Image (tube, grey):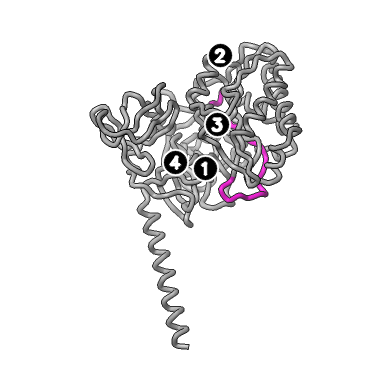
Amino acid sequence: MKNKFLFITVLSALLIAAGIITTIAMANANAVRVQAEVLNVRNGPGLAYDVTSQVRKGEVLRVIGEENKWYKVRLDNGNSGWVASWLVENTDVSAASNSVAIVNSEDGLNVRSKPSTDSSSLGILNTGDQINVVSEQNGWAQIQYKGQNAWVNASYITIRESTTKVDQSDLQSLTIRDDSTNIRSKPDLSGQVIEKANSGNSYEIQGVQGDWYQVQTTKGQTGYVANWVVDVGTKSEKPTKSKTTKLSEATIVLDPGHGGNDPGAKGANGTIEKKATLKTAKAIKTRLEQTGAKVILTRDHDEYISLRGRTKVASKHNADAFVSLHFDSLENEDENVSGQTTYYYSSADKGLAKSINKSLGNTLPTTNRGARVGDFYVVRENSQPAVLLELGYLSSKADENNINSSSYRTQIAEGVTEGLANYFAN
């Protein structure tokens, strides 16, 4: 009995110590690096919360809080969300000094061990790659590269500011994403609900406090709405109208996601995202060309194309629409989650996204998860009307079977074609 008591005591002490160590490790994390190929960002600390966006392997996220073994992180678009702590690793990057930059060197950018062209090269970054800048000195930018401090020539990168930094001379407006969204009396979930807003309701942004936008309610009160439940656009931003009213006269750029040394997600049965997106793009191309549309693929075989290179194809051909094709995946491999989602970044492209999403919802046998804002480079940095389609979950066996079906690709092609036709007609 005495030995049993001693064992229980020791075991309890070890568990408590492990918990303390975990808590300390999480509390000391200024930034974390994504380890999963695709990591969902959720609007709360748990798998039951909705996915608001996704980040990719290798991205560094700033930690601003933690709860229940989940990190609250700041994304590069200024929004925040929660990620599972077991799918990221801590880094020594200072959250206070981190900035996000995009590589703009056409011939590739050398990553060096020291801020000098005479130092050894640790690797090459491609145009369009996103990096986290820790500091700058004498024309060089210090970054985190494969777990170590490294340097790049600062003249070949572009620093991006957070979208939550509102210019008072050009305040932005926001649009409510879902019905019964709470407008609160203070910028906190404990704030009293002073108004309920429905999907499509718009408010002018009066200011920003942390993760909350200050707005004026319909009764003239000062209220606050969480930034993860709204879409944001500038006051001057208006829906654009394509120069053509017929799909037969349109130029469409289709972008099969991933390729080359970037395979994308992988399904339980071995489906590789980069192969599936290319097959799907070719099916859509065939259907669109039957209508008379001019169709251009960003890639027509298995090759790596930088994100910037993809958007440049749209700009070069003055595309009437850019459609990027992807297949989603969940980190917890929940087979019950399936369906397709349409993403856009600029509110000017919301009409295009809704039109395609509606047609896909009517055509595909899977759940329609709606059209929503997504901070993806190929839609964010695109000069042409652009959307990104997640056409099924490779983490779902049912969706993976669909994705490998030629009939499913045909349905996708019909949905995209119908959606584009309706967009141009209206």
Residue underneath mark 1: 37
Q: Is the stretch drawn in magenta largely helix, strand or loop? A: loop
- Estimate how packed mark 2 is, as few (under 14), some (14 to 19) or many (20 or more) residues with alpha carbons within 10 Å: few
Identify the mark nearer the N-term, 2 or 3: 3
Tag shown at residue 259: 3
Q: CA distance from mark 2 to mark 1?
A: 32 Å
Secondary structure beneath dot 1 equals: loop
The reply to whether the magenta stretch includes residue 250 is: no
- Estimate how packed mark 4 is, as few (under 14), some (14 to 19) or many (20 or more) residues with alpha carbons within 10 Å: many
Residue underneath mark 4: 58
Residue shown at the point (58%, 51%) measured from the top left: 332
Identify the mark nearer the N-term, 1 or 3: 1
Q: Work out which residue is located at the far bottom of the displayed protein and give it.
A: 1
Q: Position of residue 413 (x, y in %)?
A: 71, 27
Asked if the residue at tag 4 contacts the one at tag 1, i.e. Cβ–Cβ closer than 8 Å, the answer is: no
Residue type of the residue flagged with mark 1: Glu
Residue shown at the point (41%, 71%) measured from the top left: 14
Secondary structure beneath dot 4 equals: loop
Q: Is residue 345 left or right of residue 392?
A: left
- Estimate how packed mark 3 is, as few (under 14), some (14 to 19) or many (20 or more) residues with alpha carbons within 10 Å: many
Q: Which quadrant: the C terminus?
A: top right
Q: Position of residue 195 (x, y in %)?
A: 56, 41
Asked if the residue at tag 3 contacts the one at tag 2, i.e. Cβ–Cβ closer than 8 Å, the answer is: no
